[in-house]
């Protein structure tokens, strides 16, 4: 047996002679005597020790076999997947005028029509016929500005799922201004499970970064809607910070607690940076909190600071887990308002990254999207590979103008992973506490 290559070892600063082992493949954490590592190397482990280390993924029979298992990870995941997931862009229209919106160059009063919606229903129903459950994230623009189309799609799919004995649910990525109690109560019977809402820090920052098109602030209405709906569905609050304002974002958390939006009323709180584009413009972390990693020192400092402040107040935030860009997952798809198909919501509007349509089906995209870029010696030998699998293709394109390599996370993870583990050990609220 050999120690996995997908592992990090950190000292227990308050316990001399002991270390923390962290498996990046399993995200398992184990505290052991430092001498145990030497006994692993000399093959002098007790049987129970060997069983425990193997069960948690720290010991593997063979490095070559392990490497091949990691290289073919998505082959197995895609073969075994029983759920089809779609991000569906109902409209490019929005009632807010956020200056960092990555859709700014192609946003407008464009919405999905019923004919396209029915093509979507047909595709989802075919997946149900194949025995797959279906989960949709309705997206925009502001998705709730196309509420009749949303209801049309969800109503047909909830009936189709019931007839076929499979599951269907959906969530909404929304700015929160239209997510009132009446709307939520109408959508719950159609499969609504959760919503992601964006609040960019305390009122003055948010109202500057996310005003209505009229210029009026949106903060108070969003907070009111959170209060109205948090008992009905799982809410995730996100927020987009800059290097100049991130230290004020904990004020939002204190405001929540003061206003009765307590830790049990929000599923997650996740803050993300506003990220520079290659052309000098900017894009928000709304695209994906998981994607928003960077090696810029201020962003590393900000991510650790805000994560700690979220946990310190008892709110939950995302844990590290094995993850990859959504392009790797066969059953993940983005559907544009016009029926165009993509593998990432950030690719919408770029004809070269369109992979088909609801009418035409899905075409070839492996080469254009850099599907196998991480299957190289440098990545396969990296202990962090299971946490990124080559990173975000969108951020790579932002930095270089092309998907011409991996979005390496080594610098970021070298600087943050040990502290993130420490935060989870010391600050994360324990179940039942």
Image (cartoon, rainbow, N blue to C red):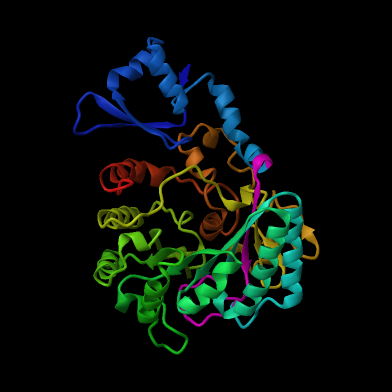
Q: Is residue 12 above or below residue 141?
A: above
- The reply to whether residue 141 is visible in this rendering is no
Picture coordinates of residue 259 (x, y %)?
Answer: 27, 72
Nearest to the observer: residue 151 or residue 393: 151
Query: Would residue 314 appear left or right of 148 to someone viewing this image?
Result: left
Q: Please tell me whether the stretch drawn in magenta is mainly helix, strand or loop.
A: loop
| Region of the chain picked out in magenta, as a range | 79-106
Q: Quadrant of residue 343?
A: bottom right
In depth, the one of 412 and 69 nearer the eye is 69
Q: Position of residue 415 (x, y in %)?
A: 34, 44
Q: Position of residue 6 (x, y in %)?
A: 46, 31
Q: What residue lies at 51% left-to-right and 31% top-to-bottom?
A: 381
Determine whether, in the image, residue 308 is placed left or right of residue 163: left
Question: Is residue 353 among what the camera can see?
Answer: yes
Q: Quadrant of residue 255?
A: bottom left
**Above or below: residue 160 compared with residue 31:** below
Residue at 48%, 65% (x, y): give it.
Answer: 286
């Amino acid at each position: 047996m050999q120690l996995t290559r997908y592992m990090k070892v950190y000292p227990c600063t308050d316990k001399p002679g002991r270390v923390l082992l962290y498996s990046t493949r399993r995200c398992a954490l184990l505290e052991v005597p430092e001498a145990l590592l030497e006994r692993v190397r000399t093959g002098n482990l007790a049987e129970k020790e060997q069983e425990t280390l193997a069960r948690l993924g720290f010991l593997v029979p063979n490095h070559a076999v392990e490497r091949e298992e990691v290289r073919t990870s998505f082959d197995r995941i895609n073969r075994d997947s029983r759920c089809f997931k779609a991000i569906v862009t109902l409209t490019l229209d929005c009632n807010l005028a956020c200056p960092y919106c990555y859709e700014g160059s192609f946003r407008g009063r464009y919405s999905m029509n019923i004919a396209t919606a029915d093509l979507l229903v047909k595709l989802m129903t075919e997946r149900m016929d194949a025995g797959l459950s279906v989960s949709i994230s309705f997206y925009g623009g502001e998705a709730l500005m196309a509420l009749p189309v949303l209801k049309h799609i969800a109503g047909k799919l909830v009936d189709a799922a019931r007839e076929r004995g499979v599951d269907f649910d959906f969530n909404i990525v929304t700015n929160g201004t239209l997510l009132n109690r009446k709307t939520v109560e109408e959508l719950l019977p159609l499969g609504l499970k959760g919503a992601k809402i964006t609040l960019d820090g305390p009122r003055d920052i948010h109202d500057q970064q996310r005003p209505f098109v009229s210029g009026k602030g949106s903060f108070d209405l969003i907070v009111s809607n959170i209060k109205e709906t948090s008992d009905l569905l799982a809410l995730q609050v996100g927020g987009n910070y800059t290097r100049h304002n991130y230290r004020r974002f904990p004020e939002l958390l204190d405001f929540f607690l003061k206003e009765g939006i307590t830790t049990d009323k929000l599923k997650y709180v996740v803050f993300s940076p506003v990220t520079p584009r290659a052309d000098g413009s900017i894009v928000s972390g709304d695209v994906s909190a998981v994607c928003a990693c960077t090696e810029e020192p201020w962003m590393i400092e900000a991510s650790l600071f805000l994560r700690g402040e979220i946990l310190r107040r008892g709110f939950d935030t995302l844990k590290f887990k094995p993850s990859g860009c959504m392009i790797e997952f066969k059953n993940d798809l983005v559907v544009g308002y016009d029926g165009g198909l993509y593998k990432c919501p950030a690719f919408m509007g770029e004809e070269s990254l369109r992979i088909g349509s609801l009418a035409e089906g899905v075409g070839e995209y492996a080469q254009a999207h850099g599907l196998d870029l991480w299957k190289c010696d440098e990545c396969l030998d990296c202990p962090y590979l299971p946490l990124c699998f080559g990173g975000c293709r969108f951020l790579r394109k932002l930095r270089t103008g092309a998907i011409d390599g991996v979005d390496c996370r080594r610098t970021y993870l070298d600087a943050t992973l040990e502290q993130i583990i420490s935060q989870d050990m010391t600050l994360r609220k324990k179940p039942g506490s």
